[in-house]
Image: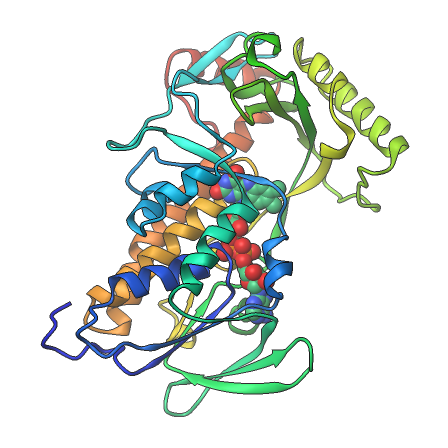
Amino acid sequence: MASDSKHFLSGRKIVVCGAGLGGLSFVLSLLKSWDAAIPAPQVIIVDADGREESLNRGLYDLQLNADTEESALVGLRDLGLSDAVLAQAVTQNNPDATMHVWDKSWKSLMTIKPKTVEGFTTGGVRIRRTALLAVLVDAVEARTKIAWATSVQDAKRLPDGTLRVSLQDKASGATSQEECDLLVAADGDDSTLRKIFRPKDVTKLTGHVAIGGQVDFGDKASAPAPLTRDFGIIVGGDGVASAVVQLNNNGKLLWSVFKEEKTPRATAYDNADAAAFQALLDEARASAKSIGEPLPELIGQTKQETTFARSVRERDAFGHEAAELRGVVFIGDANRLVSVYMNNGGDLAVRDGITLARELVAQPSLAAATAAYDKAALARSTKSIKAGRSTMNTAHLSGWKWTMAKTALSAGGFLAGN
Ligand SMILES: Cc1cc2nc3c(=O)[nH]c(=O)nc-3n(C[C@H](O)[C@H](O)[C@H](O)COP(=O)(O)OP(=O)(O)OC[C@H]3O[C@@H](n4cnc5c(N)ncnc54)[C@H](O)[C@@H]3O)c2cc1C
């Protein structure tokens, strides 16, 4: 950005709907990239949740990677947050670990050695979502205010092309309006703004369910081979698959069993209910009966409070070329939902926020910035969704199709469903 020219966003107003991973990364990146010599845009960031409510929501660990220049940890380093993120990480990836595709007897058919971007000491971390959010919130609040407990209720385009956003304060119910030149929709999977601007874009069930839980062996030597270090997918070859990942480097593992389930369950699984927990373990054993040890051992040692049963969901990514989206940009889960077979939605949300901010700073107009954002972010999201589908298709192969895929996997090439 040339410091002697006025930028197209100078003195304009940007409303960011959602202070999650995407919205906060966007604001931080914009504040960091903006040339202090040029009048800045006014940025208003709102979140429907209260501050404490938001910081205590999402009690799960996120895997964030530094395996390509496009990954979230690289973006967070560029925002000056590497040290804070590493300090909060539950664990760092074991550099010796290998990802496998195993058959039902745990014979390795294919291996992938995770990469590490130059300059990083680890290829990835696991971090509590709440801890990552706190790092981002602290960094944003050191620079600007977040309007907590304030939700976007509606947004309308005015005749001059700007947008009028209707807000509501959660405590008092009081409503207010903001007129802005750019509206960043970072309001997650259940996005209010997507319902307004792209009402047909709904999250779909893939027709599968993931059930699973965690086991803690206390130290890696006590975990059963080959899970002392490695992780991956186990394909039963009868339509059912499993995945096991390391939650730390001391024998804490997460197992999942994936199977077809065309109709979602009538009753949501409650892991506080002892009978439902036993039924879930029985279901996992029966569904994954073709997969040998150590999966049954893991199932037998699962901690009740860590168990889950979730329908697999997904939504395609979209670009912003349509006239009705002028001045509205969707990032993170509001734009697309990556299924659990890829599970890098957080990684993508951080990258979306950073990419959009950088393009807004670098490009000569909103249209050019949006097009440049779409070029990078849409390609990245589409690749992830495609990779997730490919894994899903492979995981659920059976009969002769699995026999052929197995041969292809062992020969080093593959990808069913591509
Ligand atoms: C169990 C689980 C495990 C996961 N594991 C991983 C993983 O290992 N790696 C990974 O990369 N990803 C993972 N993900 C996905 C990841 O958590 C999400 O993709 C990511 O949080 C999306 O970020 P976001 O900013 O787009 O949306 P969110 O984090 O959902 O933030 C949206 C924000 O918008 C606010 N909001 C909503 N509506 C409004 C409104 N009308 N007005 C104002 N504010 C609003 C919400 O309060 C929220 O704060 C996992 C998800 C789950 C559920």
Where 121 sits versus 368, above or below?
above
Image quadrant in which the C terminus is located: top left
Check the image and name the residue furthest to the left: 4
Check the image and name the residue furthest to the bottom: 159
Where 230 sits versus 121, above or below?
above
Q: Position of residue 366 (x, y in %)?
A: 28, 73
Where 235 sits versus 32, above or below?
above
Q: Position of residue 248 (x, y in %)?
A: 54, 25
Q: Quadrant of residue 202?
A: bottom right
- Asked whether 406 or 21 is in front, the reply is 21
- Asked if residue 346 lies left or right of residue 151, the reply is left
Residue placed at 54% from the left, 12% from the top? 228
Residue placed at 80% from the left, 29% from the top? 280
Image quadrant in which the N terminus is located: bottom left
- Asked if residue 370 lies left or right of residue 129, the reply is left
Q: Position of residue 336 (x, y in %)?
A: 49, 54
The chosen color scheme is rainbow
Residue placed at 71% from the left, 12% from the top? 297
- Asked whether 344 or 123 is in front, the reply is 123
- Asked whether 158 or 38 is in front, the reply is 38
Q: Position of residue 216 (x, y in %)?
A: 66, 21
How many discs mark residues in the rendered view?
Answer: 0
Residue 97 in sight from this viewpoint: yes
Q: Quadrant of residue 283?
A: top right
- Asked whether 320 or 416 is in front, the reply is 320
